[in-house]
Amino acid sequence: MTPIKAALLGASHPHASTYLRTLQISSLVSGIAVCDEDSEALEKLLSNGTEKIEGNFNSLSSLLQSGGISFGIAALPTDLNELLCEQLLEAGVHVFSEKPVATTSGQIEKLISIAERNNRKLGVAYCTRLHPAALKARQMIQKNVIGRVTSVEARFITSQVRHRDPTHWLFNRQRAGGGILSWLGCHYLDLMRFILADEVSTVSMMSDTFCDEDIDVEDTASLTLQFGNGAIGSLQVGYQLAVSQSGYINGSYDSYFCIRGNDGQINCGFYSDPPVLKAESISSGWGESCRRQFEFDLPETDGYGGSIGLATIEQFIRSLEGEGELIATGSDALQIARIVEAAYQSNTSGRRVEISNS
């Protein structure tokens, strides 16, 4: 396909520099415009390299007037991102949005309607769906390798808030909409939905803030989930690792993801080196050895999400030409927002909360 022109909107986002690099290395992107009201943030972003840059703008209106933009990466603080997505979609520009897209599920519902009305695409950065371990696990579930799924257990622990600039908008509830759950836990919630091909029906959560920093969002959360097919899930997330580099790109991680069924289990090592999937099954079609291990080669790429992030954005671009579907859509972001909102409601009420999947 003919390479297209893209825009990156949000120069101070934690992922801005890596999003820019992804656009620069993609053969499907011919030119890039960058936009932010903060001139200093723009200058800092462009100090990382100006390859393919065809313009930088301090307002959305001036960017749109320049013309030629096929899609935009929306990466503003969450409380501002919803309006940005709306304006882009109304202007006829396809949108690839940072998660969680907006601070409420109602705002995301509105964006889905706007995208449909304008026949525009709304994609979301749930890139881990394309991790080969996630795709392999999903395939195994579909082939009934572990029988009926009975549980899924996940853990995503990363560096403490003090390593991540406590003054950042991510730690302000009004701006971010939530804490560790909405910012990082959302990835594993989406992976659960994707791999199991099932929706969460109820959720309960306990969360708290244990750090000594001046923030008003949770830094630790523990969720219990039930899916439509009856499987029980658990998710532990937290800014808890004391030993870590500073920043968002090179932080430390403690991760675990396991799906269990009546006939076996699948353990996904997304962050191991190399990435690995370990499976065991007593299924009659599995073969003589009940335990197998699969290792995956992920090419090193210095953009957002590495080679998986590049593949996600390039598939988004191809979908604009009718070549395949989006990896994750506005509807996926909506379901995650509903789970997160129900979890926060549960934490306040002390009760299990049902989730609307309509």
Image (cartoon, rainbow, N blue to C red):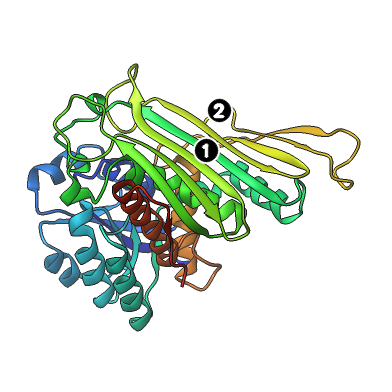
Q: Residue 77: image x %, image y %?
A: 20, 51
State the CA–CA distance, disc 1 to disc 2.
15 Å
Q: Examine the rendered structure and indicate whether residue 28 appears above or below residue 296.
A: below
* Badge 2 density bin: few <14, some 14–19, many ≥20, Cα 10 Å: few
Q: Can residue 25 be seen from the camera position used here? A: no
Q: Examine the rendered structure and indicate whether residue 13 appears above or below residue 164.
A: below
Q: Which residue is drawn at 56% across and 67% down?
A: 324
Instruction: Identify the residue under disc 2.
Output: 272
Q: Residue at x 25, y 33 (%)?
A: 209
Instruction: Identify the residue under disc 1.
Output: 154
Amino acid type, label 1: Ala
Front: mark 1 or 2: 1
Q: Residue 355: image x %, image y %?
A: 43, 62
Q: Residue 308: image x %, image y %?
A: 50, 45
User: In which image quadrant can residue 158 be found?
Assistant: top left
**Tags 1 and 2 touching, CB below 8 Å:** no
Q: Residue 348: image x %, image y %?
A: 28, 48
What is the total number of numbered labels drawn onto the structure image? 2
Looking at the image, tell me whether mark 1 or mark 2 is earlier in sequence order.
Answer: 1
Q: Examine the rendered structure and indicate whether residue 313 appears above or below residue 93.
A: above
Q: Which residue is drawn at 85% across and 43% down?
A: 286
